[in-house]
Image (cartoon, rainbow, N blue to C red):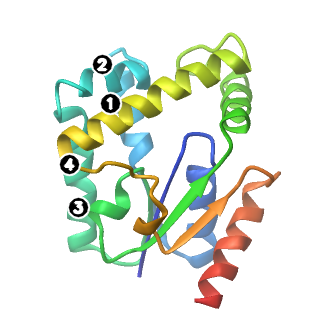
Amino acid sequence: MIFTISGVPGSGKTSVAKILAKRLGMKFYSMGNLRGKMAIERGLTIAELNTLGETDPITDTTVDEYQKELGEKEDGFIVEGRLSWHFIPHSVKILLLCEPAESARRIFESERSQNGEQNDEPPYKSVEDARQKLDARLASDHLRYQKHYGIKNYLDATHYDVVLDTTRNERPEQTVEQILSALHNR
């Protein structure tokens, strides 16, 4: 069985996927981390990599081809990535949503707690600054996914088996429990 976890920035995709993988004894892959590493290697933020990707599809297709191959060759893993559901269509597809103000707060707090560690997020001056930059990132995502793959809205709930709003969840473990409950009830 393969689980794909998609969602908006700050919804808890990576944290939830790691915890769920550990609970189920499965491998974990992060497409966001691969793209983040690609950005850092190029001396870019993730937003800058996304802007580059609006004209150069290689910034997306490299990671997307990798996850497609994973889905064809492996089983028994969890992958987080915005388009993982698309590239591994036989997976159990999970979408995590979060209200924009809460997403921005989470990412701002996370970036502040990095203590100077190199990461792919741009520096944020405030939660509002984070929200504006996240809005721009989502707009770039939508543009690239439409242009490269013909996907009009990756957040369309009809693409997914389980859709959860994590806005009120204080811990990723709560979201994991909600996923397991939803899967049990299917």
Q: What amino acid is at disc 2?
A: Arg
- In this picture, residue 29 sits left or right of residue 61: right
The image quadrant that residue 133 belongs to is top right
What is the secondary structure assignment of the residue under circle 4? helix
Residue under circle 1?
Answer: 38
The local secondary structure at tag 1 comes to helix
Q: Amino acid at mark 1?
A: Met
Going 83% across and 51% down the picture, which residue do you hit?
A: 170
Is label 3 or label 2 in front? 3
Indicate whether 51 appears above or below 34: above
Q: Is residue 83 above or below residue 157?
A: above
**Callout 3 secondary element:** helix
At horizontal 31% and vertical 77% (from top left) the residue drawn is 90
Instruction: Say which residue label 4 marks.
Output: 149
Relative to 48, 25 lies left or right: right
Task: Compare marks 3 and 2 and give the one earlier in the sequence.
Answer: 2
Q: Is 80 in front, or is 102?
A: 102
- State how far apart marks 4 and 1 are (Cα): 20 Å
Q: Residues within 10 Å of mark 4 (few under 14, many from 20)?
A: few
Mark 3 belongs to which amino acid?
Lys
Q: Which mark is residue 68?
A: 3
The answer to whether mark 1 and mark 2 are in CB contact below 8 A is yes
**Which quarter of the rendering shows the N terminus?**
bottom left
Looking at this view, is 181 or 101 the one in front? Answer: 101
**Any mark on residue 42, and which?**
2
Does residue 13 appear in the picture of this structure? yes
Mark 2 element type:
loop
Q: Name the mark nearer the viewer: 1 or 3.
A: 3
What is the three-letter code of the residue carrying label 4? Tyr
